[in-house]
Amino acid sequence: MLKLRKDGYGVMGPTPPEFDPRNIATVDTLPPPAGGTFRSTVTAVPASVVARSTWGPGCPVTLEDLRYVTVSFVGFDGRPHTGELLVNKAAAPAMVRVFKKLYAARFPIERMVVTTAEERDAPPTGDGNTTGSFNCRSAAGTTHWSQHAYGLAVDVNPFMNPYMKGGITLPELAGTYRDRADVRPGMITRGSPAARAFAAEGWGWGGNWKSLKDYMHFSRNGT
């Protein structure tokens, strides 16, 4: 765990050498796709998934507003894996199309699982790299709901695509990835497969923001 700053973020530190570049094999939590072919499912959210998610009665969406989505992805080990997302039902078809394109492009993703309340509320470690969507929380540095709280935003490979505002880098140990000219696997750059796939669905990218950069972040309304 990192020491906390007065603003609640962890103390930023140098990127560990083993994370520069970061290349960690995926640990499977769901069976990989049979035959290595892209596969997806879209269903109502199972009770077992609700129980380990961040959803609760105080969230700005109901369970009926959400869908449980599974998609195939390629890991940094070059192997096919199955990931899971909670997304708004209005966004579910678009997310299947996006991740199908990323799979075809062999864009590597380290980990794709539903965010748990324990992960959301845990002290920062500075090394997170989970691709995910629904997270019942406020936007970074604000008191209003994040688009993640509606299931209308997705963060992709956060460690390789950090949030950057002034001297703040999130995750806190991802400083090496502030250099966007040094393109390494899993990074999102203008014109890269992830940027093109989300743009085709009309989703905005935090890498285009002016006052700060949130390279991991895509959202339906651009915020």
Image (cartoon, helix red, strand yellow):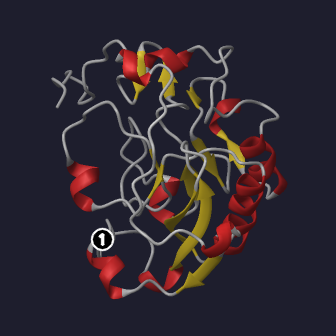
Residue 34's x, y, as percent? Answer: 61, 75
Can residue 206 be seen by looking at this rendering?
yes
Q: Which quarter of the rendered picture does the N terminus lie within?
A: top left
Point 49% across, 67% down: residue: 84
Q: Nearer the viewer, residue 151 or 128?
A: 128
Q: Which quarter of the rendered picture does the C terminus lie within?
A: top right
Number of labelled discs? 1
Q: Is residue 78 above or below residue 211?
A: below
Furthest residue toward front: 35
Amino acid type, callout 1: Gly
Point 82% across, 34% down: residue: 191
Residue 184's x, y, as percent? Answer: 63, 25
Q: Is residue 152 above or below residue 208?
A: below
Mark 1, residue position: 58
Q: Is residue 135 above or below residue 105?
A: below
Point 69% across, 14% down: residue: 181
Residue 53's x, y, as percent? Answer: 32, 68
Q: Residues within 10 Å of mark 1 (few under 14, many from 20)?
A: few
Q: Is residue 109 left or right of residue 28?
A: right
Q: Is residue 192 left or right of residue 59?
A: right
Point 81% across, 45% down: residue: 196
Can residue 90 be seen by looking at this rendering?
no
Q: Is residue 174 left or right of residue 117?
A: right
SS for dot 1: loop
Residue 221's x, y, as percent? Answer: 67, 54
